[in-house]
Image (tube, grey):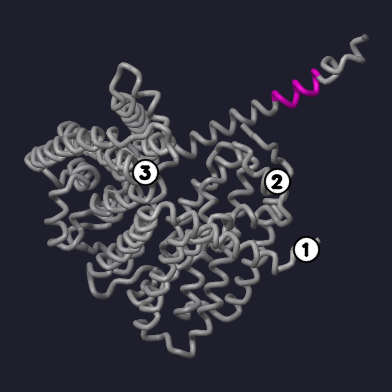
Amino acid sequence: MSTPFNFYVRVARQYTRIGWVRKSQFRWEFVNQVVMDCLYYLSFLLTFQILYGLRDDLTLAGWTRDDIRVFLGMAFVTDAFMMTWLGQSWHFGDDLKAGNLDAFRLRPGPVWFTYSFQRFSPEGLTNMLVAVGLLTYGLVRHPAIGAADLWLVPLAFAVAFTAQAALVVLLQGLEFWAVNADLSRFFSQIFTQISDRPLDVYPRGVKRFFIWAVPIGALAWFPAGVLVGRHGALFVLGYACLIALFAVAAGRLFARGMRRYESAMS
Amino acid sequence: MTASQDPARRTFWPLLRQATAYELRKQVAFRVGFVVRELGHGLVEPLVMLCVFWALYRSAGEGAVLRGWTFPELVQYVAGLLVVRKAMFHNRALDLSTQIFEGRVTKYLVMPMDYFVLAVARFTQYTLLQLGIGALTWTIGALVAPEHWLFPVSFGACAGALTLLLLGSWCCFLVYYILNALAFWLDVVWSLLVMVWFVISFAGGALLPVSQMPPVVFRVLEYGFPYWTISAPIEVLMGRLAAADVARGLAILAVTAALLEAVRRVVWRRGLARYGGAGM
């Protein structure tokens, strides 16, 4: 029996309310997390500013300084989505070991959703505003992007957010087969480090792997490419469909993993 | 009651088989965890950085020199970074703030010892393990790609770089210890720790060599301990910095370590005075 869409909305609304209540206990931590992410953004902006400042005519595998502004904006937006909604994934390995998924099995809804989306983060939402601001600045400064291209922004966001959620669910699903290995946290960090740069800078085989096999290209490379006009219409359509299939596959893998779940696993 | 009727005997073999498989799986998972956490730590970011520089220097043209660095020199820098990043103390090895938050420090306070010794033991274990893994990483790189790899210019350079790295790593440890101890006041300090790591890695040269940054930025950052912990040891190994620079770096690190130690003592003493002992 499929879960009605309204269910996801109602649960997400409750998680949002709980997130605000939880965060009101640690106000200083709220400020720290906002500043932390701003420093993260700043370190990237400065690094690329310095790299492009080494000489006037430099590009990064065809990405100009204007393109990179849009790319970084998109990378920050995706990261802020992760921080806002998917922060619990950092604790999945520990929760799996301790048997903390029991309560989620009893809830009337898919475990991948009720577990992964449970930790709504108000500070993540605040950083989302900063990230959207940086992306907007990048779009406005880009000479080849006009008002007629703005309809592509929702498409870029939809693909990036779907891919981010699917990736989190996929990595969590793999942990059922390697309890205590901290796979999801480790790979999540690695994939973030790789996807925070345009995939074109990597050797061809690596680039293809991260576009087609583990599609982390959908986190920033693809959506930013859509916005700056680097991808053809057919590729855009095909890749969006691929990400939808990837999300379904990730959900199925997680459900299979749940069948291996033994409450306290080690 | 016969053997076939006794439930404990009937379930013995199936249970033994299942429990053995479970224990084996658990052990293998712990090994995977070790490989992932310890061997894999700090490997990917330098390689990502190398790819970015590769793309950048390709667009700059053959034999380009960008602010004093050629591409082969940057490859050597990244090779050094692979080892230095591993050996440098990382906050993941310290869980003091969690212990304070959950009130678990209490049991150590009643023991006739200084709690700090336990943290120093953690630093020692981390450093020994990561130096071993770093040496292994360096050996593999030297065997696989000797023409691109970083080989120390002299034994003296190697000793100087190692001393800088260890003293800088000690400064990192003290910084993280102080930040963890702020949990006496702030309860949760996770984001502070991550924030400081961003600053240390940028100011130290984990994203690009500090000497390749604009001169005005370099002149500021060369007075900070992160530069002498990450970037400088690699440049010493490459022969870009001389013995006089090493001496200057050691002086900066020694003064920083002394200041941090004084701050650590004050923060710990005042924090303990606030400590309720029960946790949250």
Task: Classify mark 3: residues with Cα within 10 Å, few (<14), some (14-19) or many (20+).
Answer: few
Relative image position of residue A34 (x, y in whole percent): 37, 60
Residue marked by disc 1: A2
- Determine which residue is flagged by label 2: A258
Q: Residue at x 18, y 55 (%)?
A: B211
Q: Is residue B27 magenta?
A: no
What is the magenta segment's predominant secondary structure? Answer: helix
Q: Earlier in the sequence, mark 1 or mark 2?
A: 1
Snapshot quadrant of residue A159: bottom right
- Label 3 sits on a secondary structure element that is loop
Secondary-structure class at tag 2: helix
Q: Residues within 10 Å of mark 2 (few under 14, many from 20)?
A: some
Quarter that holds the C terminus of chain B: top left
Image position, residue B177 (x, y; %): 29, 37
Check the image and report above or below for B221 versus A155: above
Q: Are marks 1 and 3 in contact (CB under 8 Å)?
A: no
Q: State which chain disc 1 sits on.
A: A
Q: Look at label 3 and name its amino acid.
A: Ala
Q: Amino acid at mark 2?
A: Met
Mark 1 Cα-neighbour bin, 10 Å: few <14, some 14–19, many ≥20: few
Residue designated by label 3: B145
- Who is closer to the viewer here, A77 or A14? A14
Chain letter behind tag 2: A
Taking the image as shown, residue B140 lies to the left or right of residue A17, namely left
